[in-house]
Structures are given as structure tokens and as C-alpha cells.
Image: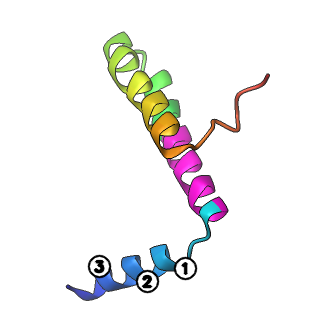
Amino acid sequence: MNLVSQIIALLLSLLTKDAYKKVIDKLLDAVEGVVTNSGNKTDDAIVLPLCRKARELLNVPDDDEIG
């Protein structure tokens, strides 16, 4: 394992469950933002449902949603 992989593995091992969920939420928020603002409806139809499914499977709710 190279040094970068070791550093990433160490950082991931130090994350608490709540911190992990916040990181995943921000990552998915970024992906969803890029897809939504792309103007391309095809990626909306493919990527956004995948992001919703990832949130469901990883139990990471979208903290930006209201209601």
C-alpha cells in the first residue's frame, strides 16, 4: 500500500459515524448540485436517483431537504 492510501485509510479510521455521514452528505450534495445545474436532463434522470439510493443504503439523509 502506498503512502497516500495509508493516509486515507488512517483518516477514514478516525472518522466517527456522524462525521462520516456529514462527509458523505457533502459529497453527494456536490454531485447533486453539479448534475442539477448542468442543464442536461439525461444525467438528472440517471445520477440523481443513484444519489438518492446511495443515501438510502448508507443511511445518509439529505440535510438540505426541507420537511
- Residue kind at label 1, given as amino acid type: Leu
- Whether residue 33 sits left or right of residue 51 in the image: it is right
Residue at 56% x, 43% y is 59
Which numbered tag is attached to residue 34? none
Which numbered tag is attached to residue 5? 3
Magenta run includes residue 36: no
The location of residue 36, given as percent across then percent down, is 49, 22
Residue behind mark 2: 10
- Residue kind at label 3, given as amino acid type: Ser
Looking at this view, name the residue that lies furthest to the top.
41
Looking at this view, name the residue that lies furthest to the left.
1
Name the element at disc 3.
Answer: helix
Q: Magenta region: which residues?
A: 18-30
Question: Which quadrant of the view contains residue 1?
Answer: bottom left
Looking at this view, name the residue that lies furthest to the right.
67
The location of residue 31, given as percent across then percent down, is 45, 38
Question: Which quadrant of the view contains residue 45?
Answer: top left
What distance separates the C-alpha of mark 3 from that of mark 2?
9 Å
Q: Earlier in the sequence, mark 3 or mark 1?
A: 3
Residue behind mark 1: 14
Name the element at disc 2.
Answer: helix
* Numbered disc total: 3
Question: Which quadrant of the view contains residue 23?
Answer: bottom right
What is the crowding at mark 3: few (fewer than 14 residues within 10 Å), some, or many (at least 20)? few
- Residue kind at label 2, given as amino acid type: Leu
* 4 shown above or below 35: below
What distance separates the C-alpha of mark 2 from that of mark 1?
6 Å
Residue at 38% x, 78% y is 9
What distance separates the C-alpha of mark 3 from that of mark 1?
14 Å
User: Nearest the camera: 13 or 32?
Assistant: 13
